[in-house]
Amino acid sequence: QVQLVESGGGLVQAGGSLRLSCAASGSLFRINNMGWYRQGPEKQRELVAEITSGRSTNYADSVKGRFTISRDNAKKTVFLQMNSLKPDDTAVYYCNMEGTHYNGRLFSSWGQGTQVTVSS
């Protein structure tokens, strides 16, 4: 089982910054795509940013120019740098990793979620 542990969420004022981290524990697997999703109150979960094994990135229009996703393959970690935060960014943020176990089985794992609250 690939377990993901998130950190970095919290309360911040509008215009501030936060940096989220998500690290995978375990071994005997290869990670391909990594991504960050969020779910605000009474909203569906949406893709915020994703990064491929080749480090190509894709961002939601609402965060483009403000958020940056990156990865550290050696540490099996994905980051989300969030700048110029707005109250609309308030949500529970989830990381996701997709890959392959060495036995050939595909996996898609999710973190437990971390709360980001942006005050006006």
Image (tube, grey):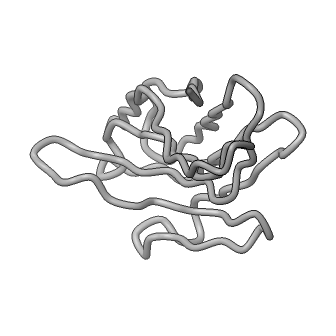
Q: Is residue 111 above or below residue 78?
A: above
Quarter that holds the N terminus: top right
Tell me the quarter of the picture where residue 44 sits.
bottom left
Measured from the top left, where is residue 109 in percent x and y? 49, 39
Quarter that holds the C terminus: top left
Q: Nearer the viewer, residue 7 or 4?
A: 4
Q: Is residue 54 above or below residue 107?
A: below
Q: Residue furthest front?
A: 103
Identify the residue at horizontal 52%, vertical 70% (top origin).
Answer: 59
Identify the residue at horizontal 47%, vertical 65% (top origin).
Answer: 63
Q: Nearer the viewer, residue 91 or 77?
A: 77
Q: Nearer the viewer, residue 117 or 119?
A: 117
Total count of labels: 0
Q: Residue furthest right?
A: 74
Measured from the top left, where is residue 20 in percent x and y? 60, 36
From the viewer's perspective, tell me whether residue 7 is left or right of residue 101: left
Identify the residue at horizontal 51%, vertical 42% (top origin).
Answer: 95
Measured from the top left, where is residue 117 in percent x and y? 36, 32
From the viewer's perspective, tell me whether residue 38 is left or right of residue 41: right
Measured from the top left, where is residue 32 in percent x and y? 69, 58
Q: Is residue 103 above or below residue 46?
A: above
Identify the residue at horizontal 49%, vertical 47% (top origin).
Answer: 108
